[in-house]
Amino acid sequence: MQGDSSKHTPKKRGLLLVMTGASGVGKGTLRARWLADKDVFYSVSWTTREQRPGERDGIDYHFRHRDEFEAALEGDGFLEYAEFVGNFYGTPRAPVEEALASGQDVVLEIEVDGAMQVAAKSPEAVLIFIVPPSLTELRRRLEGRATETPERIEKRLRRAREEILAAHSFRYVLVNDDVDRAVTDLEAIVHAERLRSDLITDAELRRIVET
Ligand code: 5GP
């Protein structure tokens, strides 16, 4: 037997699931497909970047001015945050903590620096690193979006290369070559994580031995 059973809290907390990986790797598409029919709390990030056509404030992001973001940052309002291509992005702390405490699973979809901050602060977080089938494919996806200059694409690809080579820092690595398969893999990860021994409450264990 391992561990000290006294550290287990009586109430079952939700899982903190962190999807991360290079921009362009398909995190958003995967997340939308995965969560379409699930009762999971998706954490809507704050961002200082401009709203793109089709994006909804409060659903895709909370679009905020830089000074509001900085004030929230000073008030320790974020679980993690990062500056990405000149804009700030952050995970508001309170809604995530409330959902977890109420037993709901929470999904974050964030870039790699932020995911590392979450890992450092919340060792129980489940980090899932999404990688493209190849850098050539990632380049194709970034060029297809046509939202970036060629220099920025090169910069992102160099960064993606370094991150992929450091993939051992994450608990799971998932190759996004086929969305259906990747969603099946995500479900398998969640299924296995729910069976972790640190998630079973002492009350449940006692019930087993006393009945
Ligand atoms: P985009 O501007 O394309 O929507 O997002 C740029 C990058 O920021 C993506 O990799 C996205 O996953 C990431 N991102 C979105 N929200 C957050 C957040 O709250 N924190 C961090 N660290 N990254 C985020």
Image: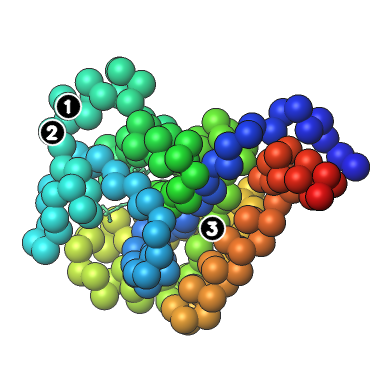
Quick check: is the Cβ at mark 3 less than 8 Å away from ligand 1? no
User: Where 150 sits versus 58, above or below?
Assistant: below
Residue 65 rendering spot, x and y as whole percentages: 13, 33
Q: Secondary structure at mark 3?
A: strand
Give the amino acid at mark 2.
His
Residue farthest toward the front in the current orientation of the protein: 211
Ranked by sequence position, the earlier of labels 2 and 3 is 2
Q: Secondary structure at mark 2?
A: loop
Circle 3 is placed at which residue position? 129
Ranked by sequence position, the earlier of labels 1 and 3 is 1
Q: Secondary structure at mark 1?
A: helix
Mark sitting on residue 68? 1
Whether residue 18 appears in this view of the structure is: no
Residue 66 rendering spot, x and y as whole percentages: 17, 30
Residue shown at the point (69%, 33%) measured from the top left: 8
Asked if disc 1 and disc 3 are in contact, CB closer than 8 Å, the reply is no
Circle 2 is placed at which residue position? 65
Asked if disc 1 and disc 2 are in contact, CB closer than 8 Å, the reply is yes
Residue shown at the point (23%, 41%) measured from the top left: 47
Give the amino acid at mark 3.
Phe
Displayed quadrant of residue 147: bottom left
Label 1 – label 3 distance at C-alpha: 30 Å
Displayed quadrant of residue 142: bottom left
Whether residue 211 appears in this view of the structure is: yes
Label 2 – label 3 distance at C-alpha: 30 Å
